[in-house]
Image (spheres, rainbow, N blue to C red):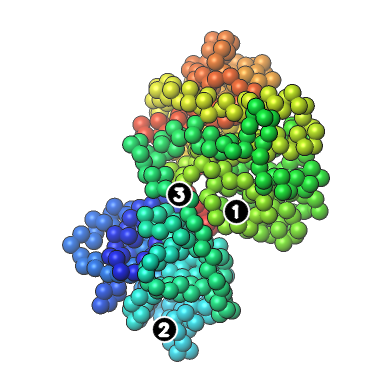
């Protein structure tokens, strides 16, 4: 949450920072602001999106070779101009942007108020900035030392960038819990919450770790810990192209990402799965194979859509590997006193690799001796780096706030890893293993085929766009897909949607059913098919409107449902990779019909780095 960008070097900073903010808008879009230094400090900030700020600064003096910019997802203080970042210190000499939450800000604010400070905003960030200024004033120390002292006093999460009117080439940056990437150029440096703002300028980046502070000048980067000891920056080569973060002719990133799935799933399988040879090559699994084979239990930690992938993993791993699996919301797990036994494996699933709850939950579990396995999309992200082993989903940058292609990447990784472990444990027959490998290998082509019928699901969506509430039901492997379909619809169209196991519906939600309620059944051909047919009949008997996602060749459900969408046949274990896609499209088309900005739906942010 919140995107931060910085630049220091010989170029004009404004266009670099503003374009960087556009790429980071997925992290929050409540307000935008920029601070430049040209003779004196110039801070421009505005409620709303980057485009609003661009309008606001028209005609203003934007010349500067140093700049910091921020796109906000509000935590402390409502989204308005005064709470927008950058904040300026009481003296007016310092400007700071912040991503995170200062938990003990109230105490520090009280101390500063007693010393006569006043505050222009309601934010915790302005409190931290004035705290830094106060330390610098009292101790007559450098800004770097003042930042270090202040950070030792605060609790919470932060990534901060500061510039000082009296030191016009330097950005001071520090992080704990919120991401920070520094791009290393020739005589210039770039800073960002992720690497996208610097993609066209440099491929050499440094991922800053927690409790590290960087003093960044055009031709030097000094990295230190909070104990003031120097750390050698570890430079990583970026493996990402500009085209991956552009819309490429689609109206929205979400649609582009849905339609990319044949290739993203293919990229995820490529080099790993070879059905003809009967092999799955995953070094992250292989290196931890003994731990997986001996595991008494697997605990999966995730949030949101990634949590739904975790639920699919529970069904698949228990079925294939015969290892008990528990799936936990990371936000709950981290605050209770969970029992972690020797031999337990924790799997963290995260697209961004930065979700605060998931990150802290696995940090705690790691301290208790658990082996952490990460299923992550963003290469080099915090969760990827603290995991003992892992597998990337290789879905490429996901910009649309609603997760789509990262989800199918997670499912593909889960299915491959479960198959690999099961074969090693001998809990799956060679015949079924081989058959599932071929099934998995065929998925990209089947996704391609079903996407050709996108217009069909669009028509269904338009028919029901006026609904105010909806139910999503599924059984077995398709139950998590029903949950995911409901989550997609509510975040992208603002229609209330509840996901339920289809049989559980009789124990409460059925009371909602009337002639206005669309009920979406995820009912592909599987071992529960007859049971779900009965559930559909139960809804029809109460005049509910049934939309069903079914397998080609199904002759029963078309006679019962009001609308159907066909997906190609697949083994029930693999079917979630297909059945989730019409639900992504459904939410997209309904959202568009309702005029929602589907790439940036209200109140959401893509990378949830606050708890
Ligand atoms: C929903 C969505 C969120 C994320 C959740 C976890 O479309 O995108 O529910 O899945 O915030 O994020 P990651 O996977 O980055 O940990």
Residue ID at (61%, 43%): 307
Q: Nearer the viewer, residue 564 or 113?
A: 564
Q: Residue at x 59, y 38 (%)?
A: 271
Residue 259: % across, % down: 44, 32
Task: Determine whether the residue tagged by mark 3 lies in a helix, strand or loop.
Answer: loop
Residue at 62% over, 19% down: 525
Q: Is residue 22 above or below residue 540?
A: below
Horizontal and vertical percent position of residue 471: 54, 29
> Is label 2 in a helix, a strand or a loop?
loop
Residue 472, position as x, y percentages in the image: 55, 29
Q: Quadrant of the C terminus?
A: bottom right
Query: Mark 3 sits on what residue?
Result: 240
Quadrant of the image occupied by residue 483? top right
Question: Pointer 3 and pointer 2: residues touching (CB < 8 Å)?
Answer: no
Q: Which mark is residue 116?
A: 2
Residue named by callout 1: 384
């Amino acid at each position: 949450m919140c995107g931060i960008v910085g630049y220091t070097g010989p170029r004009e900073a404004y266009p670099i920072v503003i374009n960087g903010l556009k790429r980071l808008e997925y992290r929050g879009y409540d307000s935008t602001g920029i601070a430049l230094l040209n003779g004196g400090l110039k801070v421009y900030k505005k409620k709303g999106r980057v485009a609003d700020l661009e309008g606001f600064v028209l005609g203003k003096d934007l010349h500067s070779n140093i700049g910091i910019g921020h796109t906000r997802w509000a935590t402390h203080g409502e989204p308005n101009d005064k709470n927008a970042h950058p904040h300026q210190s009481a003296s007016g000499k310092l400007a700071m942007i912040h991503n995170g939450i200062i938990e003990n800000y109230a105490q520090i604010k009280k101390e500063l108020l007693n010393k006569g400070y006043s505050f222009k905003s309601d934010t915790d960030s302005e409190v931290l900035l004035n705290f830094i200024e106060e330390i610098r004033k009292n101790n007559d120390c450098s800004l770097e030392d003042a930042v270090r002292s202040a950070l030792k006093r605060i609790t919470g999460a932060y990534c901060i960038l500061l510039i000082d009117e009296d030191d016009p080439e330097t950005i001071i940056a520090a992080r704990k819990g919120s991401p920070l990437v520094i791009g290393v150029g020739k005589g210039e440096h770039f800073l960002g919450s992720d690497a996208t703002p610097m993609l066209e300028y440099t491929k050499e980046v440094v991922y800053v770790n927690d409790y590290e502070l960087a003093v960044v000048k055009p031709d030097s980067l000094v990295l230190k810990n909070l104990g003031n000891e120097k750390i050698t920056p570890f430079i990583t080569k970026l493996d990402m192209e500009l085209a991956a973060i552009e819309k490429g002719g689609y109206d929205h990133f979400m649609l582009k990402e849905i339609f990319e799935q044949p290739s993203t799933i293919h990229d995820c399988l490529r080099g790993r799965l070879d059905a003809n040879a009967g092999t799955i090559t995953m070094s992250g699994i292989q290196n931890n194979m003994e731990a997986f084979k001996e595991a008494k239990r697997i605990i999966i930690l995730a949030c949101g859509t990634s949590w739904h992938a975790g639920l699919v993993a529970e069904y698949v791993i228990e079925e294939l590997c015969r290892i008990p699996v528990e799936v936990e919301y990371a936000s709950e797990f981290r605050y209770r006193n969970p029992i972690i036994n020797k031999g337990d494996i924790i799997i963290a699933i995260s697209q961004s690799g930065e979700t605060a709850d998931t990150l802290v939950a696995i940090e705690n579990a790691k301290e208790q001796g658990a082996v952490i396995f990460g299923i992550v999309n963003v290469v080099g992200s915090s969760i990827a780096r603290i995991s003992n082993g892992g597998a990337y989903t290789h879905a490429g940058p996901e910009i649309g706030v609603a997760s789509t292609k990262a989800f199918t990447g997670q499912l593909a990784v889960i299915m491959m890893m479960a198959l690999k472990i099961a074969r090693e444990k001998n809990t799956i027959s060679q015949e079924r293993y081989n058959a599932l490998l071929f099934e998995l290998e065929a998925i990209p082509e089947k996704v391609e085929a079903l996407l050709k019928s996108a217009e069909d699901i669009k028509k269904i969506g338009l028919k029901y766009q006026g609904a105010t509430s909806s139910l999503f039901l599924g059984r077995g492997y398709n139950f998590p897909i029903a949950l995911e379909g409901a989550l997609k619809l509510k975040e992208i169209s603002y229609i209330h949607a509840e996901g339920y196991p289809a049989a559980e519906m009789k124990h409460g939600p059925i009371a909602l059913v009337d002639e206005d309620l669309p009920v979406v059944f995820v009912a592909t051909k599987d071992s529960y098919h007859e049971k779900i047919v009965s559930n559909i009949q139960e809804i029809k008997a109460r005049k509910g409107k049934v939309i069903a996602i079914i397998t080609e060749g199904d002759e029963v459900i078309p006679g019962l449902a009001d609308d159907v969408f066909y997906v190609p046949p697949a083994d029930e274990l693999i079917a979630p990779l297909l059945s989730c896609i019409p639900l992504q499209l459904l939410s997209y088309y309904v959202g568009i019909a309702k005029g929602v900005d589907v790439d940036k739906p209200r109140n959401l942010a893509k990378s949830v780095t606050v708890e």
